[in-house]
């Protein structure tokens, strides 16, 4: 087995491998590696990506970027994609479970060696929820990154099944979103630009609106050129919201890969905040992706509140709520991190503890009245059962006599009772009840029948 760095001559083979690997999605490709290298130049990122080969066959591709920042005035090195978890290694299709495990162990041992040599403080990986292995698993998935001494820091995302028909998709949309979509249709229309239909001028409209909406240019022009090229190649599209007079008031770009879609970037024209632009853009894009044969759409991250490794602000939680309003289901994003430096772990642990302590909801609304009522019911249920008279009092002799006559009249009753039949008991009780006084409780009769049958079986065993 050979370990080879990702060099220009391997780019095509790498990307072809990603198309067939069940673990890979667009985030594994060389195009996305290039995008992240260009996205935040201040991090001085460097690609350490490598692949495993066996002869001419690629067994695994391992995207890996080294970034450098400053912490307390000192260099702080980390493995991530611009601060986002790196997609976990993608392995070849058809490998046995044992081979996969051995290969993953080798990969993470190598990553650990690189971390030590480069004085890396922190590594962060995730299993991509849009990968075929997660969307259509053979077995329940789990966070196998934990095998390699990584700590779980999983999160969640919202996924829509585009295989549903339009009526089912609409039924999954939250009511207030439905109303906003209907309202937006009165003022807006949506245009989809993809492939050759995306002009340079139209893409520039989006890019310039993106800067106006943010109040600044948020990232290098090269990253916008990459997105434009992806859309022009047919791997994505841009949805435009226009007023009746043709004026553009919103854009959103999407990427499609291996039958699934993801929203990459969105912006609204400042001054049109009262229009539910995003509602209509999202809904029409969902329908368009469905017509193009995509099966799943990842709407985006879901943040519900603080955890010990995630501290979303109110804006992030509001965005999560907005995204979940378009239906679908919330699914896990399995993530794991490793602290390669004890010093960094101590510092980060203290920082997270302070954040968690200060922002966690220690007091939440509670229904104390219902809780007290439930506790009272549970206490009453747990009290000792007071037996009914027919369960403890002596069986009247008249009942015993009639029960014995019923058993004697059905000679096969003992054998059937021995074989576990409960029907024979019910039959004998019913027969006897027809002859006893009306004020006799059925439980007296049942006790008499069951005692007689048990005595008969015991007598047979003794003889």
Image: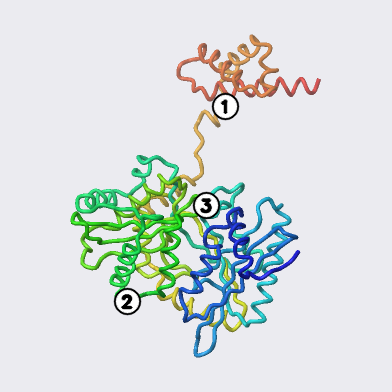
Determine if residue 318 is in view: no
For image coordinates 57% across by 27% down, the residue present is: 394
Residue farthest toward the top in the current orientation of the protein: 409
Determine if residue 129 is in view: yes
Q: Which mark is residue 216?
A: 2
- On the image, the x and y values in percent for residue 396 come to 55, 21
Residue designated by label 3: 258
For image coordinates 66% across by 24% down, the residue present is: 420
Distance CA(mark 2)–CA(mark 3): 34 Å
Q: Is residue 443 left or right of residue 375?
A: right
- On the image, the x and y values in percent for residue 65 come to 57, 73
- On the image, the x and y values in percent for residue 361 come to 39, 68
Q: Earlier in the sequence, mark 1 or mark 3?
A: 3
Pick the residue in front: 263 or 177. Answer: 263
Residue designated by label 1: 394
Q: Which mark is residue 76?
A: none
Q: Secondary structure at mark 2?
A: loop
Distance CA(mark 1)–CA(mark 2): 92 Å
Distance CA(mark 1)–CA(mark 3): 77 Å
Q: Earlier in the sequence, mark 1 or mark 2?
A: 2
| Disc 3 packing (10 Å; few <14; some 14–19; many ≥20) | some
Pick the residue in front: 120 or 431. Answer: 120
Residue farthest toward the left in the current orientation of the protein: 245
Residue farthest toward the bottom in the current orientation of the protein: 73
Q: Earlier in the sequence, mark 2 or mark 3?
A: 2
Pick the residue in front: 314 or 433. Answer: 314
- On the image, the x and y values in percent for residue 134 come to 55, 53
For image coordinates 21% across by 61% down, the residue present is: 274
């Amino acid at each position: 087995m050979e370990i080879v760095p990702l060099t220009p001559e391997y780019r095509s083979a790498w990307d072809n491998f990603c198309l067939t690997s069940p673990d890979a999605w667009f985030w594994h490709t060389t195009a996305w590696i290039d995008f992240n290298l260009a996205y935040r130049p201040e991090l001085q990122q460097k690609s350490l990506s490598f692949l495993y080969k066996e002869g001419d066959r690629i067994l695994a591709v391992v995207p890996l970027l080294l970034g450098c920042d400053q912490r307390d005035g000192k260099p702080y090195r980390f493995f991530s994609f611009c601060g986002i978890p790196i997609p976990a290694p993608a392995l070849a299709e058809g490998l046995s479970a044992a081979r996969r495990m051995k290969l993953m162990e080798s990969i993470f041992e190598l990553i650990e060696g690189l971390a030590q040599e480069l004085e890396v403080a922190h590594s962060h990986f995730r299993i991509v929820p849009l990968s075929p292995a997660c969307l259509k698993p053979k077995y329940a998935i789990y966070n196998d990154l934990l095998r390699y001494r990584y700590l779980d820091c999983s999160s969640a995302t919202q996924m829509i099944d585009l295989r549903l028909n339009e009526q089912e998709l609409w039924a999954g949309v939250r009511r207030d979103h439905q109303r906003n979509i209907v309202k937006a249709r009165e003022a807006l229309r949506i245009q989809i630009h993809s492939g050759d239909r995306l002009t340079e001028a139209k893409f520039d409209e989006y890019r310039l609106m993106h800067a106006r909406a943010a109040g600044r240019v948020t990232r290098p022009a090269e990253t916008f050129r990459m997105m434009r090229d992806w859309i022009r190649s047919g791997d994505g599209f841009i949805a435009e919201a226009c007023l009746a007079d043709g004026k553009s008031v919103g854009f959103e770009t999407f990427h499609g890969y291996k039958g699934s879609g993801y929203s990459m970037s969105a912006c609204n024209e400042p001054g049109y905040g009262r229009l539910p632009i995003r509602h209509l853009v999202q809904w029409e894009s969902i329908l368009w992706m469905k017509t193009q044969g995509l099966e799943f759409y990842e709407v985006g991250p879901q943040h519900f509140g603080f955890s010990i490794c995630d501290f979303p602000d109110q804006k992030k939680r509001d965005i999560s709520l907005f995204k979940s309003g378009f239906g679908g289901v919330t699914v896990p994003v399995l993530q794991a991190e490793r602290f390669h430096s004890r010093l960094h772990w101590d510092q980060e642990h203290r920082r997270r503890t302070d954040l968690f302590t200060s922002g966690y909801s220690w007091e939440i609304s509670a229904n104390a009245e219902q809780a007290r009522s439930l506790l009272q019911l549970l206490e009453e249920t747990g009290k000792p059962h007071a037996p009914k008279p027919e369960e403890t009092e002596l069986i009247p002799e008249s009942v015993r006599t009639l029960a014995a006559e019923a058993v004697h009249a059905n000679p096969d009753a003992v054998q059937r009772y021995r074989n576990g039949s409960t029907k024979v008991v019910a039959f004998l009780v019913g027969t006897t009840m027809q002859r006893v006084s009306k004020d006799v409780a059925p439980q007296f009769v049942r006790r008499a029948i069951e005692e007689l049958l048990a005595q008969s079986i015991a007598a047979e065993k003794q003889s």
